[in-house]
């Protein structure tokens, strides 16, 4: 049983830990992080060359199950995974941590994209100190002259590359983050608005609590939907159970062929 995990998230690493060495596990990393923490099992870095390239790799390496455990905003990779799984063909599961939901006291403004998030900042009016936690990709959406009066604190694992906002300070850090740490960032940098993607999960959620406590508005970018027809697991444990089910079905199929 060979499981290919499209990784780069906390869930993908945990899944590899639980599956290996019971089954052969290969985790594929996109290579966008300079020093990724390698998961157990085999690791490959870099793209496949689109859906066709992924399907070809699946066939050549005799993959039996494909798990899309990428970031909830990796829409292109997820779409390629769906097309490749159908073409190979192999069963496909998407692992998606539950979305965040506002609670009493939150002041959230939702946006459908980074461009809409930038528009939401303009709608708040005045000069703002923005804690931008959407990662280092896509910062060009906030680089327009309309936001030149804003000052941005950008947090990411690796340093961003231009274009990015005119007044940008970079904070290089990797989650999980603590509530006390997020409170200190908001206080020390005098943040008065937070911009984030709806990544879900607990690792980066403390900033939402800190913003609520401080009465700071949060612009939340909604995540793209999972491709149609793809099974979804909200936890790593459910993903392990899915892999075990696929393995059991494959074993039963082999026994049936042998008895014939």
Image: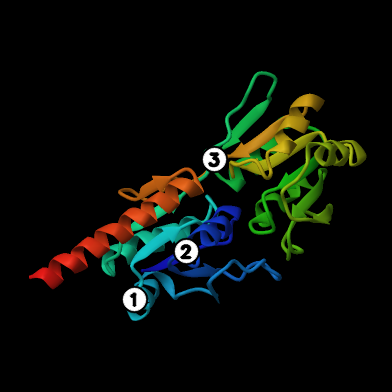
Res 143 label? none
Q: Nearer the viewer, residue 10 or 253?
A: 253
Q: Residue at x 72, y 51 (%)?
A: 175
Q: Which residue is mark 3?
A: 222
Nearer to me, 142 or 39: 39
> Dot 3: what SS?
loop
The reply, left or right, for residue 19 in relation to residue 255 is: right
**Disc 2 element:** strand
Q: Residue at x 67, y 49 (%)?
A: 134
- State the residue position of label 1: 62
Q: Residue at the far front: name it.
A: 259
Quadrant for residue 10, please give it: bottom right
Q: Nearer the viewer, residue 95 or 14?
A: 14
Asked if the residue under mark 1 is in contact with the one under mark 2, i.e. CB atoms within 8 Å, the reply is no
Locate residue 85, reporting x and y percent. 32, 64
Tell us which disc is closer to us: 1 or 3.
1
Mark 1 neighbour class, 10 Å CA radius: few under 14, some 14 to 19, many 20 or more:
some
- Answer above or below: position of 73 versus 213: below
Quarter holding residue 29: bottom right
Q: Which residue is mark 2?
A: 5
Q: Earlier in the sequence, mark 2 or mark 1?
A: 2
Q: Tell me if 74 is positioned left or right of 207 in this view.
A: left
Tag 1 secondary structure: loop
Q: Residues within 10 Å of mark 3 (few under 14, many from 20)?
A: many
Quadrant where the C terminus sits is bottom left
Q: Is residue 82 above or below residue 229?
A: below
- Measure how far apart labels 2 and 1 are at the Cα level: 14 Å
Residue 88: x and y in percent read 28, 70
Place residue 106 in its image quadrant: top right
- The residue at 14%/65% (across/down) is 256
The quadrant of the rendering that contains the N terminus is bottom left
């Amino acid at each position: 049983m060979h499981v290919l995990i499209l990784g780069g998230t906390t869930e993908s690493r945990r899944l590899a830990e639980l599956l290996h060495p019971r089954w052969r596990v290969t985790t594929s990393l996109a290579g966008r992080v300079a020093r990724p923490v390698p998961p157990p099992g085999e690791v490959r870095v870099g793209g496949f060359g689109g859906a066709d390239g992924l399907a070809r790799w699946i066939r050549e390496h005799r993959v039996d199950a494909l798990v899309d455990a990428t970031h909830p905003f990796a829409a292109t990779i997820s779409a390629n995974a769906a097309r490749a799984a159908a073409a190979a063909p192999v069963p496909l599961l998407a692992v998606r941590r539950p979305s965040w939901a506002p609670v009493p006291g939150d002041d959230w403004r939702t946006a459908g994209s980074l461009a809409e998030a930038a528009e939401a900042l303009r709608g708040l009016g005045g000069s703002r100190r923005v804690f931008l936690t959407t990662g280092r990709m896509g910062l060009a959406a906030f680089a327009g002259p309309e936001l030149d009066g804003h000052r941005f604190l950008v947090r990411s694992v690796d340093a961003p590359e231009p274009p990015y906002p005119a007044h940008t300070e970079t904070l290089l850090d990797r989650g999980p983050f603590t509530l006390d740490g997020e409170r200190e960032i908001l206080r020390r940098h005098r943040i008065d608005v937070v911009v984030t993607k709806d990544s879900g999960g607990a690792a980066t959620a403390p900033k939402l609590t800190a913003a609520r406590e401080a009465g700071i508005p949060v612009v939340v970018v909604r995540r793209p939907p999972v491709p149609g027809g793809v099974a979804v697991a909200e936890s790593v444990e459910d993903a392990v159970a899915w892999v075990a089910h696929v393995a059991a079905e494959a074993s039963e199929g082999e026994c049936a062929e042998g008895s014939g």
